[in-house]
Image: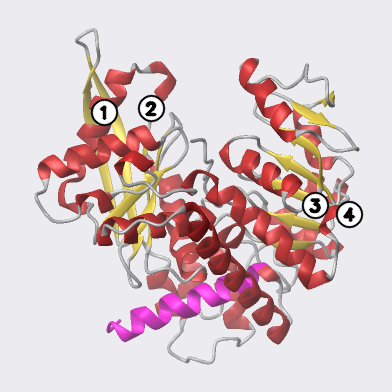
């Protein structure tokens, strides 16, 4: 499963939170918009949006600080007998509302700053969709393509042993992320169950195969959540979704299912898709299943697909479209892209795909943004369903799972719209406003 959950801006905002005289956050257009948790929280405070006087700079500083950061060096015995030290991280940001929750990624560029920022993001995402989790993230600094399956299994099981009591069904629940999949989650469950005789060991991790307690529809959940956002936006703006032209950057798990559901169920035209290698466009609409089959048969290269025209990979972001869905890379929508795009709606299917400068331009142009903490929350909602089913040992069918996912995502969308309209603020700021109110309330009730 190739769910690309990448980091936000890596700058620390602690000093800004602690300084009562702080100026408007950078890149907020004189305080009119914000682009991440720190700038949105500061902007909310400056505008006096929070009526609870206990939400002050000290509380914001606390909520922006990670509760625990675990740095490990795991000795991996290679198949040839050599020993390879591997850096690994697990950052637990906040658990005021429930157990820590977040994926584990395997990538050679993983570092502590990136994992820290992703853990922060997960706290606000779970709060926004109102599921009883906090935020965490993990990563191993390794290129999994350079390891054999046996080495990956040994490394994964060693990670579980190194984390020890810091993960568990009611402590911290990992999930798939970049370059990890249901097989990796199965290894985590297996090792944890051997080391812990507690009840419900299945609930230690989500994103497992259905045969090991995984949730039906988990694979499509993030992409389906993106499609639900487009559908609800069309209701909000009274637009016929079949009239829309959609461009999607990223054709992995999230991008593929988003494209499939948008084209089949909403009848919108997906006029452009791209992956890490290539990009294609067709103003008349792309046959998503045919494109996927071609990609699978040609090692990911879409350039020869006969049902569309091949273009430069990065050009996909600026093709003529009504809806732009970045579903691959962080910081994809730069100032330049924002200036050139013709889209009226941006749905952030990737984490932090819009730079601060790009966000300011989108705001100036009046482009509606569905922020990543809402747009791609379908995956963690489905993980919540898997966790509860593992604890109860009572499993849902596909129809019930999809219906419950729809209900959660729709509720979150309209809550963001309500706050946005009430306070006259952007959708991103409204989303962070709701998330902060919920996490702050839980922290204060627990005695912060």
Is disc 2 in contact with disc 1, using a CB cutoff of under 8 Å? yes
The residue under label 3 is 323
Disc 2/disc 3 C-alpha distance (Å): 35 Å
Is disc 2 in contact with disc 3, using a CB cutoff of under 8 Å? no
Residue stretch in magenta: 428-448
Disc 4/disc 3 C-alpha distance (Å): 11 Å
Element under label 3? strand
Q: Is residue 310 above or below residue 156?
A: above
Element under label 2? loop
Pinpoint residue 189: horizontal percent, then vertical percent: 24, 42
Q: Is the residue marked by circle 3 packed among few (<14), some (14-19), or many (20+) residues within 10 Å?
A: many
Mark 2, mark 1: which one is toward the viewer? 1
Between disc 4 and disc 3, whose residue precedes? 4
Is disc 4 in contact with disc 2, using a CB cutoff of under 8 Å? no
The residue under label 4 is 243
The residue under label 1 is 155
Mark 4, mark 1: which one is toward the viewer? 4
| Rendering quarter of residue 40 | bottom right
Disc 1/disc 3 C-alpha distance (Å): 41 Å
Q: Is residue 225 above or below residue 366?
A: above
Element under label 1? helix
The residue under label 2 is 142
Tell me if I can see residue 24 in this picture.
Answer: no
| Rendering quarter of residue 278 | top right
């Amino acid at each position: 499963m190739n769910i690309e959950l990448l980091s936000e801006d890596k700058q620390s905002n602690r000093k800004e939170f602690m300084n009562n005289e702080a100026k408007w956050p950078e890149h907020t257009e004189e305080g009119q918009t914000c682009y991440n948790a720190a700038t949105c929280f500061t902007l909310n405070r400056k505008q006096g949006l929070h009526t609870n006087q206990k939400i002050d700079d000290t509380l914001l500083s606390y909520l922006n600080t990670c509760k625990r950061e675990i740095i490990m060096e795991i000795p991996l015995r290679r198949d040839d007998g050599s020993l390879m030290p591997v850096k690994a991280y697990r950052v637990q940001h906040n658990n005021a509302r429930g157990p820590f929750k977040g994926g584990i990624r395997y990538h050679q560029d993983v570092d502590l700053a990136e994992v820290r920022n992703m853990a922060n993001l997960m706290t606000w995402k779970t709060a926004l969709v109102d599921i009883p989790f906090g935020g965490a993230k993990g990563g191993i600094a390794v290129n999994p393509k350079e390891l054999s399956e046996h080495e990956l299994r040994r490394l994964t099981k060693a990670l579980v042993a190194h984390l020890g009591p810091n993960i568990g069904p009611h402590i911290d629940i990992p999930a798939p992320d970049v370059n990890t999949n249901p097989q990796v989650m199965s290894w985590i469950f297996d090792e944890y169950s051997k080391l812990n005789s507690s009840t419900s060991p299945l609930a230690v991790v989500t994103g497992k195969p259905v045969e090991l307690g995984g949730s039906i529809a988990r694979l499509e959940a993030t992409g389906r959540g993106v499609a639900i956002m487009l559908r609800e936006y069309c209701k909000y703006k009274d637009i016929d979704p079949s009239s829309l032209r959609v461009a999607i950057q990223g054709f992995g798990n999230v991008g593929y299912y988003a494209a499939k559901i948008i084209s089949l169920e909403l009848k919108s035209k997906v006029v452009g898709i791209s992956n890490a290698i290539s990009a294609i466009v067709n103003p008349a609409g792309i046959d998503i299943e045919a494109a996927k089959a071609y990609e699978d048969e040609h090692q990911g290269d879409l350039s020869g697909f006969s049902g569309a025209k091949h273009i430069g990979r990065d050009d996909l972001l600026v093709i003529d479209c009504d809806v732009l869905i970045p579903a691959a890379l962080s910081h994809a929508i730069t100032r330049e892209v924002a200036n050139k795009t013709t889209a009226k709606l941006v749905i952030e299917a990737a984490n932090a795909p819009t730079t601060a400068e790009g966000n300011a331009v989108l705001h100036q142009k009046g482009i509606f943004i569905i922020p990543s903490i809402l747009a791609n929350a379908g995956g963690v909602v489905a993980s919540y369903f898997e966790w509860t089913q593992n604890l109860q040992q009572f499993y849902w069918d596909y129809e019930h799972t999809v219906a419950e996912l729809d209900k959660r995502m729709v509720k979150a969308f309209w809550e963001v719209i309500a706050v946005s309209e009430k306070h006259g603020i952007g959708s991103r700021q409204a989303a962070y406003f709701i998330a902060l109110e919920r996490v702050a309330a839980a922290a204060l009730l627990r005695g912060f």
